[in-house]
Image (spheres, helix red, strand yellow):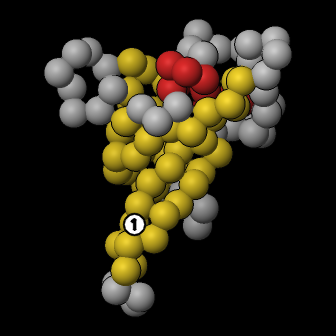
Amino acid sequence: MKNEYDWIKSQFTAADLKGKTVHFKAPGPDGKILERDGTFDAAQDSRGWIRVALLYHDFTPDRGAIVGGKMFIPADFVANIVRNPPGSKCEFSFIAA
């Protein structure tokens, strides 16, 4: 199974996703499951294929500050992106956990 951050053909374009809000549940960099709201970052190549990342913020008690995080969505999981109905808290949902 291909499980890497790579270009992929998708039902969405980068313009559909970039900067849009998303509620996600996915394994974080440390392996723990993160469930929170964030935004998408996305790029598109000349073929129309996309790459997608999740941008989010975390409060770190040890630093007493809010820090940003970025998590790339592996190509195998881009299909898990779902557009939410109008009026939803976030425009999209993404579940990979």
Most distant residue in the left direction? 87
> Is residue 58 left or right of 80 when viewed as pictured?
left
Q: Is residue 79 visible?
A: no
Q: Is residue 38 above or below residue 2?
A: below
SS for dot 1:
strand
Q: Is residue 69 above or below residue 63?
A: above
The residue at 55%/21% (across/down) is: 15
The residue at 50%/19% (across/down) is: 16
Q: Is residue 53 visible?
A: yes
Residue 6 found in image quarter: top right
Give neighbour class at mark 1: few <14, some 14-19, many 20+ (Cα, 10 Å).
Answer: few
Query: Picture coordinates of residue 14 (x, y %)?
Result: 60, 23
Please state, as top left, top right, bottom left or bottom right, where the N terminus lies in the image: top right
Most distant residue in the bottom direction? 62
Query: Picture coordinates of residue 39 (x, y %)?
Result: 44, 41
> Is residue 32 left or right of 10 when viewed as pictured?
left
- Amino acid at dot 1: Asp
Query: Picture coordinates of residue 34 (x, y %)?
Result: 43, 55
> Is residue 10 left or right of 69 when viewed as pictured?
right
The residue at 58%/10% (across/down) is: 11
The residue at 49%/64% (across/down) is: 68
> Is residue 87 left or right of 64 when viewed as pictured?
left
Q: Is residue 39 above or below residue 36?
A: above
Q: How many marks?
A: 1
Q: Which residue is mark 1?
A: 58
Query: Picture coordinates of residue 61 (x, y %)?
Result: 34, 84
